[in-house]
Amino acid sequence: MTKIFAHRGSAGTHPENTMIAFYEAERAGADGIELDVQMTKDGALVVIHDETIDRTTDGTGWVKDFTYRDLQTLNAVYKFAEQYQVCRIPLLEEVLEWISGTSLLLNIELKNGLIPYEKLEEKVIGIVKHYRLEPRIIFSSFNHNSMARCRQLAPNIETALLYMEPLYQPWQYARLLGASGLHPYYRTVSESFVREAHLHHVHVRPFTINSEESMKTMFQYQVDAIFTDYPQKAKQIKKKA
Ligand code: G3P
Ligand code: CA
């Protein structure tokens, strides 16, 4: 049965990567949440998609150039001023603390493709272990070296490879890196692709599936999970599928 992961919380209807969006994902009945992690100048792990704060907050600049204290002065919901006054960029720790009181799964995407954040893998693994959430976590990244590193450091936590362009026999490649999941751009996925991946015991969780038509197709292909900005809509369509 295909699981539904709320992408950046419920980014289609709520301010992405905020506690507001994560609470909404749970309310909507998502099976899991996907979020993005970057690192501040003083080594704090913060939940934000972009390397810069410009698009989603009322500040400007690179996450890596601010301390966590600096970032706390920013408003991560300023684009939703009619509904919300202020909401801060969450710490990964804050989300994990909340997740541990729920039954949600969590996909932590390590955003270390452009910026080589020092010891990002060690830090993320350390927090996950602190909350004993290993069985409910999937690490993913477009940086596949980073996934191999996570696998080495924490063999009991699932890893998955994110990618946009089609890969040649990605299930073999995944296995080579110790990854048990492929997180491809959904247009590269076909029914035979899913079948082949499953024959190799590799999970397929495409992103980002927002239209009714693509949701129905992915449910029909029996992918293991979808990432969607609209978990509530996905739940309704899944019920009818
Ligand atoms: O996990 C799928 C998806 O989150 C990857 O793309 O850019 O939304 O982080 P992006
Ligand atoms: Ca992401």
Image (cartoon, grey):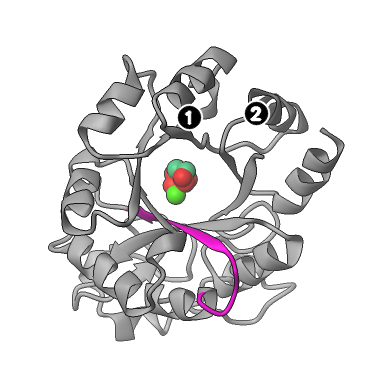
Who's the residue at 53% across and 60% down the image?
A: 105
Q: Taking 78 as reference, is 216 above or below it?
A: above
Q: Taking 71 as reference, is 224 above or below it?
A: above
Q: Is mark 2 within 8 Å of ligand 1?
A: no
Q: Which residue lies under the disc numbered 1?
A: 185
Give the secondary structure at mark 1. Answer: loop
Magenta stretch?
Answer: 100-110
Q: Taking 145 as reference, is 59 above or below it?
A: below
> Residue 40: percent from the left, percent from the top?
25, 71
Real-space Cα distance between discs 2 and 1?
12 Å
Q: Nearer the viewer, mark 2 or mark 1?
A: 2
Q: 38 or 33: nearer the eye? A: 33
> Residue 31: percent from the left, percent from the top?
63, 56
Q: Taking 219 as reference, is 238 above or below it?
A: below
Task: Please indicate whether residue 125 sits to the left or right of residue 163 in the image.
Answer: left
Q: Amino acid at mark 1?
A: Tyr
